[in-house]
Amino acid sequence: MAFKRSPLKTRDDQVTNASDLTVRQSLIPICLVTILFFLWGFAYGLLDVLNKHFQVTLNISRARSSGLQAAYFG
């Protein structure tokens, strides 16, 4: 029983399945998704802090501020 050995480099004109990717080839997409997910969560968590600063800077009431927060968070 011989295993099919896949090359480390793939051609750009070939369509490959995700199951055909090696660990080395899938490392960049996994890192990219992980970094983007962390940045999205960081920005999402920062909204409450920024909301308070926007209240002070823009001189808006708590009702307007909670309206903005409700519009974002749904």
Image: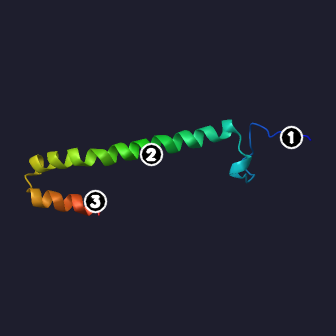
Three-letter code for the amino acid on which mark 3 is drawn: Tyr
- Residue 69 in the image, given as x and y percentages of width and height: 22, 58
Where does the N terminus fall, quadrant-wise? Answer: top right
- Check the picture and name the quadrant holding the C terminus: bottom left
Which mark is in front, 1 or 3?
1
Which of these two is toward me, 23 or 7?
Answer: 23
**Amino acid tagged 1:** Phe
Q: Which mark is residue 3?
A: 1
Q: Secondary structure at mark 1?
A: loop
Relative vertical location of residue 67 with respect to residue 20 in this rendering, above or below: below
Q: Residue at x 57, y 42 (%)?
A: 30
**Lower position in the chain sequence, tag 1 or tag 2:** 1
Q: Which residue is mark 3?
A: 72
The mark total stands at 3
What crowding class fits label 1: few (fewer than 14 Cα within 10 Å), some (14-19), or many (20 or more)? few
Residue under the point 74% across and 47% down: 20
Q: Position of residue 25 (x, y in %)?
A: 67, 39
**Label 3: element kind:** helix
Spatial CA span between label 3 and label 2: 18 Å
Cα distance between the residues tagged 1 and 3: 52 Å
| First in sequence: mark 1 vs mark 3 | 1
Q: Is residue 5 left or right of residue 15?
A: right
Relative to residue 33, is residue 4 drawn left or right?
Answer: right
* Tags 1 and 3 touching, CB below 8 Å: no
Q: Which residue is mark 2?
A: 37
Residue type indicated by callout 2: Phe
Residue at x 42% of width, y 42% of height: 38
- At label 2, counting other C-alpha atoms closer than 10 Å, the crowd grade (few under 14, some 14-19, many 20 or more) is few
| Colouring | rainbow
List x then y, in percent, for residue 71: 25, 63
User: From this viewpoint, which residue is outermost toward the front?
Assistant: 1
Q: Secondary structure at mark 2?
A: helix
